[in-house]
Amino acid sequence: MSDPRPAPLLVLRGIGKSFLGVRVLDGVDLDVAPGEVHAVVGENGAGKSTLMKIVSGGYAPDEGSIELAGEPRAFRGPRDAQRAGVGIIHQEFNLLPERTVAENVYLGHEPVRRGLVDRREMLRRTDDLLASIGETALPADARVGRLGVAQQQVVEIAKALALDARLLIMDEPTASLADHEVELLYGLMRRLQERGIGLLYVSHRLAEVFDLSGRITVLKDGRRVTTVDTADTTADELVRHMVGRELSSYYPDRAGPDDRGPVRLTVRGGGNKKLRGVDLELRAGEVLGVGGLQGAGRSALARAIFGAAPFTTGELTIDGTPIRPRSPRAAMRAGVAYVTEDRKGEGIVARQSVLDNALLASRAVFAARSGRAARTVRVRELLAAVEVRAVDDDQEIRFLSGGNQQKVVLARWLALNPRILLFDEPTRGIDVGAKSAIHDLVRRLAREGAAVLMISSDLPELLGMSDRIVVLRDGRVAGELPAGATEEDVVALAVGTVREAAQ
Ligand SMILES: Nc1ncnc2c1ncn2[C@@H]1O[C@H](COP(=O)(O)OP(=O)(O)OP(=O)(O)O)[C@@H](O)[C@H]1O
Ligand SMILES: [Mg+2]
């Protein structure tokens, strides 16, 4: 008789790791079977990425053992782990944009014929490899720099497979993907599973974790809290394990009639390369949600208001005065802050402290030395409000977990005390607990008189936070929805299944 459970592909026992005397992982056990998707969840800073780096040879564990396909392993580095069949896909890709798909896939182990790289063979193998995972639409000779994010991710995956990965690690792979791209990734993950590849999957999106995984391990403060079969648990239970307390699933109260102040911002007939005839109005005290599909013009709208890619037609007023912000600096002076979607790319200064990073924008705008102490106090409050976890605020930001770095950048913009706040995906990459703290903070800022425009692809967040929702499609306003609208309403406007005439 055969054993119903296949022998595990990966077995971790008692993994421990400290950095500068701070214990980041402590006695973590975990195993992955061939063809299993094992999700790892936990708060920002729980130790997920550190554990993934240990499995893929990036860090050596201080304690514990790693077994791959029954053999004990002590990886000497990422290359060593790769050779053993462990691939990792980081949130930031490691691709050469000027090279082709095939060149990237075979980088460092190109097929060689008579001493030269055999390009034909390389293209052929890449085509075969892509076909084997059902990616027939991606040309092996396309330049990687021209591809979208989802396709670049396929290249990363192909790269790992070209090295015969048996175990593939994905650390927040969907953080920068649009919804339809997420679907592509799901399909690809299922095909990898069918090939018997084991997947370790880190994500803050619990809906995804439930769709994809067979088992879930929860980490908290570097320890394994539990490992459960996905079918036997609920989102509430997971959150309880992650956060260690009940978390209200409620969003803060919306603006009442008294909260709504004067009109802060108007856009009339706003247009540029990506936007056409946009009209909107934003009042002090309210949160205006902006919905729509990727490419519909949501970020373009925020960038236009912020002067980063200004309107070329139409009129923009702030507090009744027509203004033409031609640069972010001009917009910042007019009291506008924009927390971009790309908070990492926007620049953390890796070797500076948490505090200096958080003070960066205020120092640029308020050049005067006066008020410095007050600004520092304010920034410290904000760092606490968004729940940044660091040893202290003198710690260099590069040592913080991904989500905590994002929170610092968020605090940096809030420190400007802006009258108009543009948020682009404010809680992406941020854990469930801190997410609700950020929601409370956004609402508090509105209540204190800020006008908030919030772009979010997270529909529950968009619906839960907004007093009104404007939905964009193809660079235009497709329609406006009141508080109480449903996900279906937003989607219908976003994809255009509701005819405007019928509204
Ligand atoms: N090289 C390092 N030096 C010092 N501390 C580090 C280093 N790498 C990680 N840490 C610390 O280890 C802890 C765990 O970080 P890790 O990146 O593993 O968290 P995470 O669970 O992946 O969080 P997130 O959800 O935010 O990505 C954090 O407190 C972080 O500050
Ligand atoms: Mg991480």
Image (cartoon, helix red, strand yellow):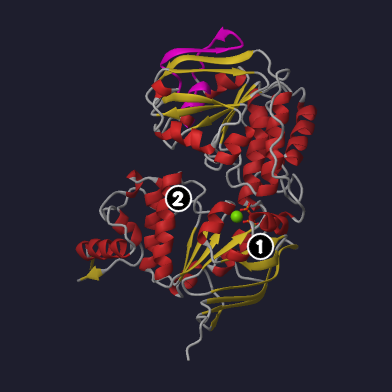
Magenta span of residues = 299-326
Residue at the image position 43 percent from the left and 61 percent from the top: 189
Q: Is residue 465 left or right of residue 381?
A: left
Q: Which residue is mark 2?
A: 182
Q: Quarter for ligand 1? A: bottom right
Residue 408: x and y in percent read 66, 41
Residue at the image position 54 percent from the left and 14 percent from the top: 266
Residue at mark 1 to residue at mark 2: CA–CA distance = 23 Å
Residue 206: x and y in percent read 59, 53
- Height in image: 206 above or below 57? above
Q: Which residue is mark 1?
A: 218
Q: Is residue 448 left or right of residue 184?
A: right
Element assignment for label 1: strand
Q: Is residue 197 visible?
A: yes
Crowd tier of the residue under label 2, counting other residues whose Cα lies within 10 Å: few below 14, some 14–19, many 20 or above: some
Look at label 2 and name its amino acid.
Val
Residue 1: x and y in percent read 48, 91
